[in-house]
Image (tube, rainbow, N blue to C red):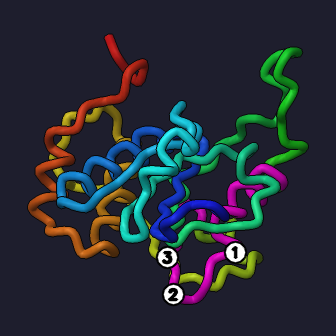
Amino acid sequence: FELCPSKNIIGVTGTKGKGTTASLIYEIIKKSGKKCFLGGNIGIAPFEFINKIKKNDWVVLELSSFQLEDLNYSPKIAVITNLFKEHLSPADPINPNFHKNINTYLSAKLNIALKQKNNDFFIINKNLANQIKKYSIKSKKIYFTESKTTSKLVGDFNKENISASEKVAEILKIDKKTAKETIKNFSNLNHRLEL
């Protein structure tokens, strides 16, 4: 965040769907003709492409709770797909990262928006509206539910991921036809609900 040549950063987090949502946002932006980069927790280190980023380019970052918990920056557009009771105990002895309880987990996730300014955007699942009330968030909150846009993505939860992506496209004033066409042709990421 500090070293990125562009401040046009979109951060995506959530217990489930952050990789799919970040990838879909990236594809929609790319299809619109804007220059865009994708990295973060998805397995692409941002430092691999930082020297290629120009001032007006867009950067989409998938961010885990562990990357967010001590982050002192927030992106221009922040997205939280959902929150479930996960990462509350060590996954295995070699990787003992976990959160003490659901509140510390939510607080880590919300770091994505806590440093935002008034002219920034926070796109969040409507299911989390009550849980975030006690936090001081200055940015414009935009809630999403399920999208009705046709897609190849399997699972009703992906309708929420699509809706979050559509909200980003609206903020960026990307033509609805371009967004719908990209969504229609977008396939599940590898290892996500494959036969």
Residue nearest the viewer, comparing 132 with 57: 57
Where residue 26 appears, x then y in whole percent?
34, 50
Residue sitting at the far top = 195
Asked if the residue at tag 3 contacts the one at tag 1, i.e. Cβ–Cβ closer than 8 Å, the answer is: no
As measured in the structure, the alpha-carbon distance from the residue carrying label 3 to the one carrying label 2 is 7 Å
Question: Mark 1 vs mark 3: which is more N-terminal?
Answer: 1
The secondary structure type at the circle numbered 1 is loop
In the image, the segment drawn in magenta is 104-128
Q: In which quarter of the image is residue 98?
A: top right
Instruction: Indicate whether residue 142 is drawn in magenta.
Output: no
Image quarter (top left, top right, bottom left or bottom right) of the C terminus: top left
Kindly identify the amino acid type of the residue bearing the numbered disc 3.
Phe
Q: Is residue 22 left or right of residue 105?
A: left
Kindly identify the amino acid type of the residue bearing the numbered disc 2.
Asn
Where residue 139 appears, x then y in whole percent?
57, 82
Residue nearest the viewer, comparing 130 with 47: 47
Kindly identify the amino acid type of the residue bearing the numbered disc 1.
Lys
Q: Mark 1 points at which residue?
A: 115
Q: Relative to 51, does residue 79 appear above or below in the rendering?
A: below
Residue sitting at the far bottom = 118
Q: Relative to 43, does residue 139 appear above or below in the rendering?
A: below
Taking the spot 61% from the left edge, 84% from the top edge, the residue there is 117
Q: Mark 2 points at which residue?
A: 119
Where residue 57 appears, x then y in whole percent?
37, 63
As measured in the structure, the alpha-carbon distance from the residue carrying label 1 to the one carrying label 2 is 12 Å
The secondary structure type at the circle numbered 3 is strand
Q: Is residue 175 left or right of residue 39?
A: left
Task: Characterize the local packing of mark 1: few (<14), some (14-19) or many (20 or more) Cα atoms within 10 angstroms.
Answer: some
Q: In this view, does 41 lie to the left or right of 153?
A: right
Q: Mark 3 points at which residue?
A: 121
